[in-house]
Image (cartoon, rainbow, N blue to C red):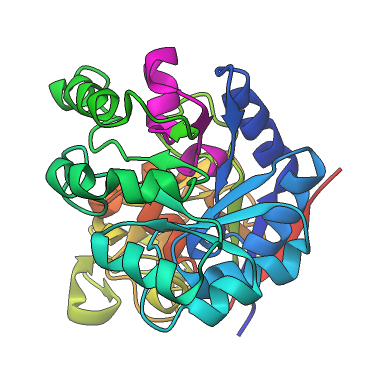
Amino acid sequence: MAQSTLTIDLNALRTNWRNLNSKTACETAVVVKADSYGLGAGKVSQMLAQIGVRKFFVALAEEGVALRQALGDGPEICVFSGHMNGDAEKISGARLTPMINSLDQMLLHIETLPGHPFGVQLDTGMNRLGMEPAEWSALREIALGQNPELVMSHLACADEPDHPMNAQQLRVFKEMTHDVDAPRSLSATGGILLGPDYHFDLCRPGIGLYGGLPFVDAQPVASLDIPVIQVRTVEEGESVGYGNTWIAEQPTYVATIAAGYADGIIRAMGPKAYVYAGEQRCKILGRISMDLIAVDVTNVAEMPETVELLGRHQSVDTLADAAGTIGYEILTSLGARYDRHYIDG
């Protein structure tokens, strides 16, 4: 079967980082967890390190080990999940900085890697990761006595600027860190856009780098072009695909393209999604199957060899809306079967 091409524009990603960085007066790190949201943490991080990024965030120690191999010595690699059982060798060997989330993690870190750098993650109301105020109050003297590299928290509703949770978490974060000398961080992409009150000493954008909301001015980074395998005429009354879910009401020119849910194209987007053949928008017909998708190309004057699912004509968030999800899921779902091509320079 013909192979689809996923193109990652490092020039656009570089521009997105610079534009987000320009909105702050503090250090701007980057989040490259989940293989840079599915776009290749090694290549993305190497490019960003070349333009001066010195701090990278991953989800797990295993991701940090792989990233250290790509980056070499120098940049700091922080691990959101902190220091988990069995992580000591990875943290030490790859010189990772775990973001400590609990008393148990703090004790484990001090016992297994005394003197090794760490940060602290506080829970300011999201109830996902980090120390709650009471736990932090009991532990703060021990933690601060070990000179943490960073004290951070995470906003739950930063993509909704008027949500009262933003101001509430800002207040709690200030209360929990008012006498902390270590650098502080509260904001990812959404927090950067909330303004300087949320920036503190370091911001750590993620989805905005990769072309997603809430950074509406982001340049598109990923594009996906899918080969056309076959074109046929489907007569009135005939159906297309599994389950006979789409039946032609008139003679329709239908192209079969070479991708499906095995490639991370979410099955649920089928009824609402489109592809582009040149400038012509073409409706997806019937169900998205594992390797094949049918599209209506009746109005296409000259059939191209490939159609665009993601790119100049529609963003990750447009596809996400069709699937009833968010851009993060679209990017991180993109499969391994694509021919990946990087544009840089």
209 is higher (above) or lower (below) than 170: below
Q: Position of residue 217 (x, y in %)?
A: 52, 24
Would you say 267 lies left or right of 257 here? left
Q: Residue at the location (55% across, 64% down)?
A: 35
Would you say 297 lies left or right of 177 here? right
Q: Residue at the location (26% across, 68% down)?
A: 104
Along the line of sight, which residue is nearer the eye, 16 or 243?
16
Q: Position of residue 336 (x, y in %)?
A: 56, 77
Residue 299 in view of the camera: yes
Along the line of sight, which residue is nearer the eye, 181 or 236?
181
134 is higher (above) or lower (below) than 111: above
Would you say 197 lies left or right of 45 here? left
Along the line of sight, which residue is nearer the eye, 93 or 153?
93
Q: Residue at the location (81% across, 47% down)?
A: 344
Q: Where on the picture, by quarter, is residue 6? A: bottom right
Q: Where on the picture, by quarter, is residue 90? A: bottom right
Q: Where on the picture, by quarter, is residue 41? A: bottom right
Q: Which residues are magenta?
A: 185-210
Query: Does the magenta portion include 190?
Result: yes
166 is higher (above) or lower (below) than 318: above
User: Which quarter of the figure is the N terminus placed in?
Assistant: bottom right
